């Protein structure tokens, strides 16, 4: 082991370095605290044996300086006292010393002191290695999750997507890396738009896996073949029933999800919905009135054999349809009060004339102001369908 | 979290003692209910009078308990507060669970069966 020896007395330095040498250690000599600090800075030595009384930076100052600095390793400080005074121990411990020896230093005493130092330093190094491994593992997990989040985002439709006479915008904000929310929308022929939104119960990776698999499962082809088997009228309830059959599990209810799907029929100026436990979508009419659509419905994956229903609503030129996940309305403030449907509707009405893009951008700071936090506990997602004023925009 | 408050004629009233049934406490609630049911409490009134909020995890735990009771007995919910009623209506759970305005009426019904 290499040890820094600090003493203003040359004979003491040589005496200690001689002892250390015979024990198989190597001593680096310093004439005062300042030199000792320099040696510690320039080397990877972790043990310093210092006289308490020295001119300039004395042993106590040295101990304090060692504790105040960050060496990236623990420095074990042994102070050597000339007289056996209790206050030296009090002051020494207070300054940050680990151990003491009194003069004259006896070889067996020096040996056990160094062994104690070795024990602590070994323990400290093991901890450092462990914490480095933990940090690496954490980084690896976070990198993987971030990559998974990117993969999930790649499943989402384009921003600012124009589908027929509708401009569609979206907001997708996982609470952590990956989201239990999933949605998509696409053109079904020239006149119609199909869409769905799902929110898997729970938070974290498990619901996100199911959400992503829904993203892969519900392709435009599957959607069209299930919801538009004969062209008209659309049957979104069949998609809900099909998914319910696929995901229901009598034993386990941890993999269930709320779902909403629908078809916007542009010439008919209608939207046909099937709601399965997902929040009611919000319709803002061109005239500035708002309505919550749908009658509710059982979430998917809970009970076998549930029959789902469709509802039909007017959705004409100038109207805006907002589909959202409950992460928005269930966000709570410091007192536990929810953001709620009414505040969300007011927010949407206040931004009635804003572009859908701005509505989506404004929602995050608005919610943050409500919760008082930059990050949200639940996944947040929203789709905004804007039907243009003109018939064939 | 879950305290039995009344036990009479084979019916047990459990009161859920927390203000929220959500992702944070749903797993514990699920385990506690499962233990009670497996120990033979299969006619249960769950007093939800103190609960302001049930999220999807909480709802899943309630459905899990209902399925666990199954045909062995009854699980009735009592004293749902308006925000919880709203979630039950949205998810149609108001048609799945037996729901009563208070524990007395729930017990009355469960004792008959």
Image: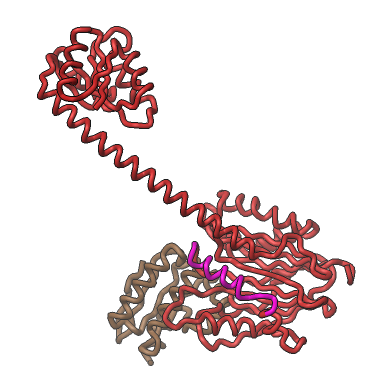
Chain colours: A red, B brown
Quarter of the image for residue A94 reads top left
Q: Nearer the viewer, residue A39 or A167?
A: A39
Quadrant occupied by the C terminus of chain A = bottom right
Q: Nearer the viewer, residue A268 or B104?
A: A268
Q: Give the left or right position of residue A97, taking residue A221 as reference.
A: left
Range shown magenta: A204-221
Quarter of the image for residue A155 reads bottom right
Tell me which residue sits at (39%, 66%) in the image: B17
Q: Is residue A316 magenta?
A: no
Q: Residue A248's spot in the image, x, y percent?
A: 50, 82
Tell me which residue sits at (52%, 71%) in the image: B84
Tell me which residue sits at (36%, 66%) in the image: B1
Q: Main secondary structure of the magenta part?
A: helix
Q: Is residue A119 above or below residue A344?
A: above
Q: Is residue A348 above or below residue B2?
A: above
Q: Is residue A200 above or below residue A70?
A: below
């Amino acid at each position: 082991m290499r040890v820094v020896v600090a003493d203003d007395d040359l004979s003491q330095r040589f005496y200690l370095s001689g002892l250390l040498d015979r024990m198989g250690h190597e001593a680096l000599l310093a004439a005062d605290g300042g030199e000792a600090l320099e040696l510690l800075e320039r080397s990877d030595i972790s043990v310093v044996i210092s006289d308490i009384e020295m001119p300039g930076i004395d042993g106590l100052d040295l101990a304090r300086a060692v504790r105040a600095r960050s060496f990236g390793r623990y420095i074990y400080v042994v102070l050597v006292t000339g007289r056996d005074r209790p206050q030296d121990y009090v002051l020494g411990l207070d300054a940050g010393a680990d151990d003491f020896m009194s003069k004259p230093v006896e070889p067996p005493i020096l040996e056990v002191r160094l062994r104690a130092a070795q024990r602590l330093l070994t323990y400290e190094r093991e901890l450092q290695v462990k914490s480095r491994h933990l940090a690496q593992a954490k980084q690896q997990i976070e990198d993987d999750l971030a990559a998974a989040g990117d993969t999930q985002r790649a499943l989402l439709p384009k921003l600012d997507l124009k589908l027929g006479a509708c401009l569609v915008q979206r907001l997708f904000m996982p609470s952590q890396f990956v989201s239990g929310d999933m949605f998509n929308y696409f053109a079904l022929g020239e006149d119609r738009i199909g869409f769905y939104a799902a929110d898997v119960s729970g938070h974290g990776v498990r619901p996100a896996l199911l959400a992503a698999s829904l993203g892969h499962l519900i392709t435009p082809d599957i959607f069209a073949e299930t919801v538009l088997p004969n062209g008209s009228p659309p049957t979104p309830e069949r998609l809900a029933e099909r998914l319910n059959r696929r995901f229901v599990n009598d034993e386990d209810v941890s993999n269930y999800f709320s779902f909403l799907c629908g078809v916007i029929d542009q010439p008919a100026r209608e939207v046909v919905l099937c709601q399965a436990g997902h929040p009611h979508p919000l319709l803002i009419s061109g005239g500035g009135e708002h309505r919550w659509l749908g009658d509710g419905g059982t979430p998917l994956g809970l009970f076998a054999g549930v029959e789902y229903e469709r509802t039909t609503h007017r959705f004409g030129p100038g109207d805006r349809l907002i589909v959202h996940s409950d992460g928005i309305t269930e966000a709570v403030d410091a007192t536990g009060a929810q953001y709620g449907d009414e505040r969300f509707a007011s927010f949407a009405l206040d931004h009635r004339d804003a572009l859908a893009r701005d509505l989506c951008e404004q929602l995050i700071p608005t919610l943050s102001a409500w919760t008082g936090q930059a990050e949200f506990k639940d996944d947040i997602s929203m789709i905004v369908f804007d039907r243009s004023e003109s018939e064939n925009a | 979290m879950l305290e039995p408050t009344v036990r009479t004629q084979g019916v047990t009233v459990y009161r859920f003692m927390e203000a929220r049934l959500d992702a944070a406490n749903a797993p514990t609630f699920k385990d506690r209910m499962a233990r009670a049911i497996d120990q033979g409490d299969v006619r249960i009134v769950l007093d939800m009078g103190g609960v302001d909020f049930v999220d999807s995890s909480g709802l899943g735990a309630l459905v899990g308990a209902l399925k666990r009771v199954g045909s062995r007995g009854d699980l009735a919910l009592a004293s749902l507060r308006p925000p919880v009623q709203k979630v039950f209506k949205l998810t149609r759970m108001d048609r799945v669970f037996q729901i009563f305005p208070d524990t007395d009426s729930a017990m009355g019904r469960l004792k008959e069966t």
